[in-house]
Image: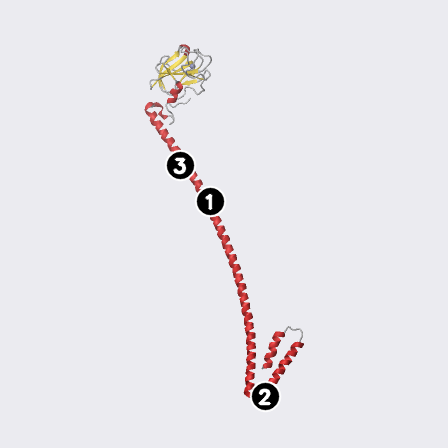
Amino acid sequence: MAFRVRPALRGKHRRRQPVRTAATLAGVAVIAGAGAFGASAMAGPDHHHAVATAAAKKNVLTQAASVTGSLANSFSAQADVQRTVANTAHEQADQARAEAAAEAKAKAAKAAAAAKAKAKAAAEAKAKAAAGAKAQARAAAAKAAAQAQSARATQAPVTAAPQAKAAADTGWTKPVDAAIGTPYHQAGSNWSSGYHTGVDFLVDSGTPVHSVAAGVVVSAGADGAYGNDVIIKHADGMYTLYGHLTEPLVSAGQTVTEGQEIGISGATGNVTGPHLHFEVRTTPDYGSDVDPIAYLAKHGVTV
Ligand SMILES: [Zn+2]
């Protein structure tokens, strides 16, 4: 039994030893010891002693085997520990990777959220601006509509006839659509009063001249320094005069509408060239003139 165990033990430890001499020698020594023991066991009177000794030897061998097993277990345990450590390291690495990934993911999500929020804010600002512009447009439209309605309401009682005209129509208009030459009240020796009693519109001969508002013709024809002129009385009690005409197209007592063609421009009377002399008076007579531009402006006509 002992023989079977020992070489196994020895062989296990020496399997890779290239030199067999030392092993053989050791083996011989052990066998010799065992042989001595065997002899004494057989020859000795104290059988109990021999049995005890054998038991002790067996114990030692068992212990050796146990130690070897322990060592093996220990190695195994160590390997386990190493595996565990390795696993732990691996797990830690995995965890670190996972954490890093999670962090990166969180960072990306945060960035995405920030970008989204920014985009949303921009969109909201844009929408707000658009809404504001829309509201302004609506307010402007409402204001314009209100003004138009107000204008219609104002105009309605004054002039009944031209109500079919555009909403912006005040019932008054320019006599001709042209630039201003000599202004009202300019001083000069050309005029008997010492100053210009009207305003001159720069038009060539042959231009149609219109009544600035509805009214009744007071006079039409030759009028001294004014040449051929037309004088019209309006509903507000004021008079308008159109001078230096080539010819009048209306006659005294005739009713005219706003914008009606009442004559053709020219250069009759006291002139240095063709133009329309437009004058506004408080009476039909010379010397009662007022500022014609201001008068037209009062009726919503800008020259
Ligand atoms: Zn004039």
Alpha carbon distance from label 2 to label 1: 102 Å
Q: Amino acid at mark 2?
A: Met
Q: Which amino acid type is marked by label 1?
A: Lys
Residue topped by disc 2: 42
* Quadrant the C terminus occupies: top left
Disc sitting over residue 118 in the figure: 1
Q: Is residue 47 above or below residue 99?
A: below
| Residue 172 visible from this viewpoint | no
Residue at x 59%, y 81% (from the top left corner)? 2
Q: Could you tell whether 155 is left or right of 19 in the image?
A: left
Whole-angstrom CA distance, mark 1 to mark 3, is 25 Å
Q: Nearer the viewer, residue 192 or 15?
A: 15
Give the foreground label among 1 and 3. 1
x and y percentages locating residue 19 in the rendered image: 67, 74
Q: Mark 2 touching mark 1, by CB under 8 A? A: no
Q: CA distance from mark 3 to mark 2?
A: 125 Å
Which residue type does callout 3 highlight? Ala
Residue 136 percent coordinates (x, y): 40, 35
Dot 2 or dot 1: first in sequence order is 2
- Identify residue for label 3: 135
Q: Residues within 10 Å of mark 2 (few under 14, many from 20)?
A: few
Residue 7 spot, x, y in % from top left: 61, 78
Does the closest atom of ligand 1 sit within 8 Å of the Cβ of label 1? no
Which secondary structure lies at badge 3? helix
